[in-house]
Amino acid sequence: MTRNLALQASGRRSGSSSSELLENFVQALFDTVKPAPGAMLILGGDGRYHNKEAIQTILEMAAANGYGRVVVGQGGILSTPPLRS
């Protein structure tokens, strides 16, 4: 059984403590979900608040946590309603 995790990238605010918050939040999600080897992650945001930087961080973390495939919305933008279809 393959688990898919949809993650909305909310971005980071300026300052090192905010980037650590993003990393801690994402790692907590990965620790909770515990993806199967090679699992797929769907990733995107609404384009605000350093979306591209947040996505880059999450991509690196996804690779380190064993995700085999990450689908990123065009330009990092992906809204939730189409994802539910």
Image (cartoon, grey):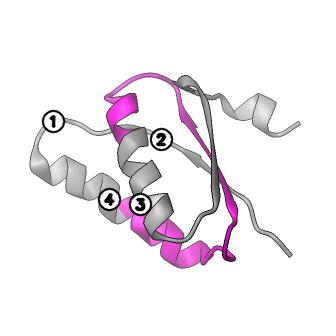
Viewer-closest of 30 and 67: 67
User: Which of the marked residues, 4 or 2, is nearer the chain's N terminus?
Assistant: 2
Asked if residue 60 is among those painted magenta in the image, a careful observer would answer: no
As drawn, the label of residue 14 is 1
Residue 47 position, x and y percent, is 46, 22
- Amino acid type at circle 4 is Glu
Residue 14 position, x and y percent, is 15, 35
- Amino acid type at circle 2 is Ala
Cα separation, mark 4 vs mark 2, equals 11 Å
Magenta residues span: 25-54
- Amino acid type at circle 1 is Ser
Left or right of 41 in this view: 14? left
Which quadrant does the N terminus fall into?
bottom right
Which quadrant does the C terminus fall into?
top right
Helix, strand or loop for disc 1: loop
User: Which of the marked residues, 4 or 3, is nearer the chain's N terminus?
Assistant: 4
Q: Is the C-beta separation of discs 2 and 1 under 8 Å?
A: no
Question: Can you identify the residue that label 2 sits on?
Answer: 9
Q: Is the C-beta separation of discs 1 and 3 under 8 Å?
A: no
Give the foreground label among 4 and 3.
Answer: 3
Q: Residue at x 14, y 53 (%)?
A: 17
Question: Can you identify the residue that label 4 sits on?
Answer: 23
User: Which of the marked residues, 2 or 3, is nearer the chain's N terminus?
Assistant: 2
Helix, strand or loop for disc 2: loop
Asked if residue 30 is among those painted magenta in the image, a careful observer would answer: yes
In the image, residue 65 above or below residue 9: below
Q: Residue at x 77, y 37 (%)?
A: 83
User: Which of the marked residues, 1 or 3, is nearer the chain's N terminus?
Assistant: 1
Helix, strand or loop for disc 3: helix
User: Which of the marked residues, 4 or 1, is nearer the chain's N terminus?
Assistant: 1
Numbered label tally: 4
Residues packed near mark 4 inside 10 Å, few (<14), some (14 to 19) or many (20 plus): some
